[in-house]
Amino acid sequence: MIFTVPMKLLYAAILAKDVQTVSDELLKLGVLDAVSVRELSEIGTKLKAQEQDPELDTIKELRRRVEGFLQLAPMRIARPDPSVYVGTPVPSSKDIEKQFDTFASQITGIRERQKEIQEQILKLDEIRRQIELYKAGGTEIFANSAFLTVKSGTVNESSWTAVEKALSSLPVVIIPGEQALNNTRFIVVVMLKRDESRVIALLQKYGWSEQIKQAIDTTATANLLADLENKRKKLTATLDECAQSFNRLFEDHGSELAEIWSKLRAAELSGAIRSSFAKTASTALITGWIPEKDMDRVEKGIRTASNNCCYIEWLTVEDAEKQGLKPPTEIKNPHVLAPFQTLVTNYGVPQYGAIDPTAFVAISYLTMFGLMFGDAGHGLVLCIAGLLWFLRSKKNNSSTTLGLLIVYCGISAIISGLLFGSIFGYALLPPLWFPYHRIINGEPVTVGGVRSVYDILGITIKFGMIVLGTGLILNWINLARKKNWITLVFDKAGLVGGWIYAAGAWVAFYFVNHNYKALPPVSSLLFLLIVPTCLLALKAPLEHIAEKKHGSQHASHVHESRAMRYMNYFMEWIVSILEVYSGYLANTLSFMRVAGLGIAHVSLMTAFFQIANMVNPTHGFSIVSLIILIVGNVLVIALEGLSAGIQSLRLNYYEFFSKYFNGTGRAYSPITIKAK
Amino acid sequence: MKSSLELYSYINAKLKTRLDLFIKKENLNNAIQAKTLIESFLPLRSTPFEILEKIYSSTGDLKMAEAELFAMELNAYLEVISLVEEPLTSFVRALARGPEIEHVKNTIRLWFDAHVRGRSIDDRTVYCYRGPTIDSFNINKILSANNTDEVIQEFLNTSYFAVIKECLPNVVKLGTLFELETALDKLYYALLEQACKNLPRSDISIAQKFIALDVDIENIASLVRLNTFLGLRNTDIEKYLIQYEDAVSVKSLKTLYASENIPAAALVLLGKKYAGLASLWSRGDLSSKLATLERVLREMRNMEARKLLAGNPFSIGIIIAYFILLGDEIVSVRTILNAKYYGLSEERIRSIV
């Protein structure tokens, strides 16, 4: 947890016939961060890569395609664990493709059916629009319409039921006559012009005889519209049935698709591992990074899978680095620190062997947040909101990091709220530390060490010094582990830089404590500041000497003249001085924003209280005052919460990380079949 | 007049945020690579176009999804109009005339097909846009109108009345809508130029440059259509071209019309910066060439839009760029979905999009 996970470089040679079994075994183990053998400077260029399985791209494509189908599913379809299928043969991709095409065409069939029904619904809607158009104009619905055809006539009375049934499936509306005359029934049919021939052909089967056009009165129009509405409802119900067919399709085939996905996924990952091997005539060579703790089981797995026909060698990181290979970085923290690990990796991946800053970020972030957002009531609201977000994310199978972070920030705010005695802006409990609200509101505080805004600012500056000091110490540890002694001692973030910072802080406090009138004696300043400032100048020349000694001189330095070199040393020294003095000062003063935001938090609440009092001067119960206070609290929680969260992040990223964090690491990414 | 900062700070920030939500190239690529229409909707999820999948899956009707695309475009204009104040309101209203005029043309085309050519149109009228527009007109009454007078009457309270009144009777006689459509296009640019004059001084040149490019693109497309489909003589084309002060002159366009390879010559005429696009014209048969030409012209507009985005953040350029890129995105989505419906190959789709 404090340092990155130790790694070892695996070299293994196996027989060509064992490539499949070994790659399956490595996939099951899920710890190999493969390195292409061709990256190795000594022998790599003479080796060929393992032949890429020509099916691999097809398998990837099919896997993406089935993922698409699973996304279309109206219900969540659980996918079997792909590790179960490692080593099992995959059906031929042609068969799978055929299966997918069949499935897609079944869906297309349902969509086509929906389209037919939708077209009928749209026709009925068009008929309605035309009827309403003429209804509004008071015009009889006659065949002057460009879109509608109105036909009136008679059909055989005995066929009336059959006519009703036959026309029910067509986008037409019928107004039946009230009485049967001469064993015939008079009807008026309203349809779209393009359906005319179809409808008339149907009616003629039932003895249709066209009559003179008649006017359609208001009652008949109302019946028409009612009939339209009924037909539309029936069609809509049919559309719903199509939707249910779609659901049934996935109920019937969903698990099959999920199984195919798992098989394809296993085959794809196994192929990915195989493609990282290099080959000779009859062997395959495997190279990759493995966490030190997994060495034994990886070796055992390879030996078992290859029936002990293998050669295995382990290299340390130092030996691997001599061959130009950089180890990947894995940082492992308890799940409870997951949000802070995300904050760290969002910034960058720590270098291998460096300190994992996650735990430190957790402490500094939450402390900063608490100092800026010190209210127990608001913290409780954040906790509840964070918990709801966490549960919702878990339900949706999405990342729970943000929800967790909000909960932690809420807890931090509750603790600081209790320290400052603030619950929803009210001093309902005595503060455990100092009365923040009373100080900000200008009330006299005579007890305790914190009595004024300047004291609060002082706290935040001291807090900033602790954070920056911690950053420096972490940097020294990292440099010591890398045995980078010159940088450790003489860098602006090294021991000399720390010396200047500590001395500068002491001088500043001396100055403040002497009422801004006196600095320390010159002899003290000489030792505290001048000496280390001069020592900074030694860094560049010592590095140059070390480079020459190791033969690793930078190309630009090789042909440099002496004058130019000394000029460069001087310039580097000047820049270091500027960076140390102005940079550290700026970094420290930056922490005053913690006080600033905390003060803003209190001030906003005070403002809302005053508005509420203005509305209700009698201080009795008032709905309006209550609303103002609720709105005020919501605004403060939202705005201040966001500000505090962002500023805490900024202080960590810029002030804290800049002292020690080198985000040039490469993340450890093993080919694994296990879900993350 | 308010300062540029006051006029543009809110709306430009809003539109720039919207631009970040536009479909990524990767999503469009995945949609093109999808095997079927159904699968091509998936990359549109979590984008403003995910509603298209909902429409398609509930109706099975791609045309309804396309109708929604038009509504999205017009509503974008109406939304921006509601968020800005004068003189920007007038200018954005004038810009919004673009899609509105397409809606007017479409409506009149349908009426023309039904009443002049005697074709059935009720399979198309159901997809007509019936939502809010800048100038209101009753599309149902227009489609049901029995003669040109009734059609003209429906446009009485719109900006298009005079043009339609003048041109519609004649196009009915001639049996082609080209003259009316050109007149409506000319009206669009006239309204745009008029609105442009009220903009802050620093914005007028930006707006005029955009109008000039648009006019050039429109004229080039017209020349190709006139040559390909109507085969008009050089002397007859002038009335179909749009005159605009900063655009390529009609005289140059007439010279262009006489050349063998209009698009290549056009691109050279427009300037060296577009010359590289001319090579795209040479491949394929006529229909693919026309599709390529449209793509090239769209790309020219997009290039100018991207330049505007990189320019002064408190200018009309951001608003213009937003609508150009929105229009382009909508065209891309519509093209891909249609292409998937008709089973076009991936290569063919890429040549169009």
Image (cartoon, grey):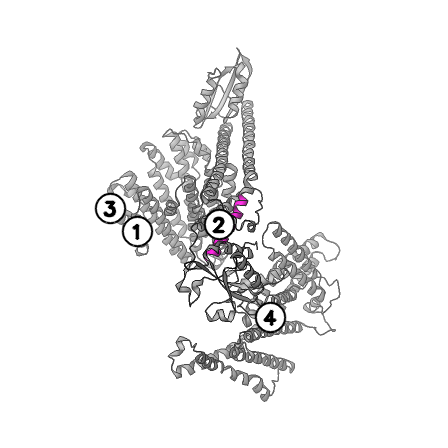
Residue range in magenta is A257-275
Within the magenta stretch, is there residue B253?
no
Compare marks 1 and 3 and give the one earlier in the sequence. Answer: 3
Of labels 1 and 3, the one closer to you? 1
Q: Amino acid at mark 3?
A: Glu
User: Is mark 2 in CB contact (under 8 Å) with mark 1?
Assistant: no
* Residue B64 seen anywhere in this rendered image of the structure: no
The answer to whether A230 is drawn above or below residue A340 in the figure is: above
Q: Which residue is mark 1?
A: B279
* Chain holding disc 3: B
Q: Amino acid at mark 1?
A: Ser
User: Is mark 3 in CB contact (under 8 Å) with mark 2?
Assistant: no
Say which of A394 and B142 sits in front.
A394
Say which of A412 and A452 sits in front.
A412
Mark 3 secondary-structure assignment: loop
Mark 2 secondary-structure assignment: helix
* Chain holding disc 1: B
Q: Which mark is residue B260?
A: 3
Residue A412 placed where, x, y %? 67, 63
* Chain holding disc 2: B
Q: Amino acid at mark 4?
A: Phe
Question: Are the numbered discs 4 and 2 placed on the same chain, yes or no?
Answer: no
User: Is mark 4 in CB contact (under 8 Å) with mark 2?
Assistant: no
Q: Residue furthest top?
A: A182
Mark 4 secondary-structure assignment: loop
Residue B36 placed where, x, y %? 45, 42
- How many C-alpha atoms fall within 10 Å of the one at disc 1: few (<14), some, or many (≥20)? few
Q: Which mark is residue B80?
A: 2
Question: Are the numbered discs 1 and 4 placed on the same chain, yes or no?
Answer: no
Q: Who's the residue at 55% across and 41% down the image?
A: A254
